[in-house]
Image (tube, rainbow, N blue to C red):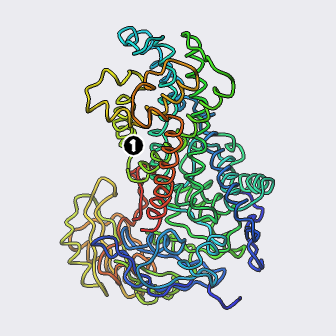
Amino acid sequence: MTASTLPVTPGGRPAPLTSPPRGGALRWWLSDVLVLTQRSLARIVREPETLMDVTIQPIVFVLLFAYVFGSAIAIPGGGSYREYLIGGMLGMGIAGTAPGTAVALVTDMSTGLIDRFRSLPMSRAAVLAGRTLADLLTQALGALVVAGVGLAIGWRVHTGIADTLAAFGLALLFGYAFTWAGACLGMVLRSPEAAQQLGFILFLPLMFVSNAFVPTQGMPGWLQAVAVWNPLSALAAACRHLFGNPDPAATVQVWPMQHPVLSVFLWSGALLAVFAPLAVHLYRRKSLT
Amino acid sequence: MADIPAIEAEGLAKRFGATQALAGVDLSVPAGGILGLLGPNGAGKTTAVRILATLLRPDAGRARILGADVVTQPGEVRTRIGLTGQYAALDNYLTGRANLIMIGRLARLGRDQAHRRADELLEHFDLTGAAGRAVKTYSGGMRRRLDLAASLIGRPQVLFLDEPTTGLDPRSRSVMWEIIRELAAAGTTVLLTTQYLDEADQLADQVAVIDAGRVIAAGSPDALKARIGDDRLTLVLAPGSDLAAAAGAVTAYAAGSVRTLPDSPATSGPRISAQVTGRDGITTEVVRSLDAAGVLVTSVTLDRPSLDDVFLTLTGSRAGGSQPAADPVPAELIGGAA
């Protein structure tokens, strides 16, 4: 240990150095969120393999479906399966990060780090907001990966730039809202392994009982009813519509399939309205009992 | 301002399910003091710290840090405290410097200020060389030092240290002790919990002995020792000695209880310790009577009472895990309040 005096508080210091300025609450909240977003991104830079769920995984799925299952799947109304696939894969590439959100939060909660955060004069909700914001950025990467591999296998956009951007924006909006469901999962589970497994168990049926990979027309009646109301079906249909890709859901006479873009907005709003306050509530409750 | 205690608790109570973790704890630490909260595992030390650091809400009682109530003014409290928990509260994937900067920013330091303060603390805690490495590559001692540095980044006036040296090797432990002494000398009020009696004795100017959620004794280490009064004679016997016969011989000279500790692979032989009234010739007499009983004595020590004896006298049982042992459970696996 060096012999210099420790740079700590002098006993007679009048006011804490860290006293936040009045009226700066929003600024501090934003600062907290950004610091924590940066933290999550810094981890990715150090361990890029944590990005597998938005890089390798969507590539593998696109290739599997395009070349293995796709040949056996007929699109009602005709059209290329590969063009059909990408609208669905976008949802998978984006919403598929939610189990990762849960894992990251459970891991945080099970170390002392969250206690440190709670003992600081920082915003309570910033931990969750920072995490979901970082996940939104990885989702954007996932969307680019899906689009890239899609272009490589022959997927094309047949509309304009505005529609294309709208499709990606819509997908990211839904992805961000869905991340909060993952955050809630992270608040109720105790081990990262449980979060990983349960996240996957919940997510896979949600993904597959939809029109993301297979048109719903071939499913049994009761399953069809579930699939057409699945928000991921609405997202896939909306993206296909905006990209000008084959969209057999347009012939399904159910409200969400007739209004896919509006459906995605409503679903995103509903997910945010339910899961964001719930996650924050669970986080606070965890902190005080 | 000067007469407000830095830490003040009245009747703190907290129950977890069927466990009464705290059953009415009163504490008071003047500004600049070091209070040692001493007790075995499960005594309620961590619960008390978590309440004082605004991490837990007490079921009953109230606590104030520099006059700010921990329940009704947690934001105020948080600008004044630093907390070093039992397990390093760091992001293992970030570098040491990035951890400090992050915590500095969250502690309301500006960007430049956070960088400067991080470098200052890294240098002081002898971590500059490791500052660019991910924390997961750090040794236990380095991690603890970084953790303590992190809790100092906002220049807290009151510092909580929950078992700051548990699981550390003796050298890292003495480094931590040195740092804690420096902090106190600079005017920081410190509340530290420990199950190591010598640690409280070394560092604290006031000690509160806590057991089963209650403070069972409080005072300066010397005052507590004075309650015991007698000296302690410890004898190490040759391996394989007749412990019962030896205890019988020693009992004749004891002023209090006689404790025996059987031989084990960790010790050099069976041990006997007894409280004896200090007087000339007492050691000689005890050794002589053991000799007469056919017991071979390997070594003899006569100590002033330690806090261990205080604890034993107060509770009638040994303090839990009073030997510094390697922490068997990795920090990552431990969650929640103890």
Neighbour tally class for label 1: few under 14, some 14-19, many 20 plus, Cα within 10 Å:
many
Q: Position of residue A53 (x, y in %)?
A: 49, 29
Instruction: Give the quadrant of the C terminus of chain A.
Output: bottom left
User: For mark 1, what is the residue?
Assistant: A195
Q: Nearer the viewer, residue A284 or B1?
A: A284
User: Residue drawn at (41%, 43%), measured in percent from left and top?
Assistant: A192
Q: Position of residue B26 (x, y in %)?
A: 47, 86
Q: Nearer the viewer, residue B201 or B126?
A: B126
User: Residue drawn at (54%, 71%), measured in percent from left and top?
Assistant: B53
A93 up-or-down from B25: above or below: above
B26 up-or-down from B102: above or below: below
Residue A133 visible in image: yes
Q: Nearer the viewer, residue B176 or A45?
A: A45
Q: Nearer the viewer, residue A146 or B116?
A: A146
Q: Position of residue B150 (x, y in %)?
A: 64, 58
B162 up-or-down from B92: above or below: below
Q: Taking B102 as reference, is B119 left or right?
A: right
Q: Secondary structure at mark 1?
A: helix
Instruction: Give the quadrant of the N terminus of chain A.
Output: bottom right
Report the label total: 1
Q: Quadrant of residue B132?
A: top right
Chain at tag 1: A
Q: Taking B243 as reference, is B21 left or right?
A: right
Disc 1 residue type (three-letter): Ala
Q: Taking A42 as reference, is B44 left or right?
A: left
Q: Quadrant of residue B172?
A: bottom right
Q: Taking B149 as reference, is A153 left or right?
A: left
Residue B232 visible in image: no
Q: Position of residue B137 (x, y in %)?
A: 57, 40
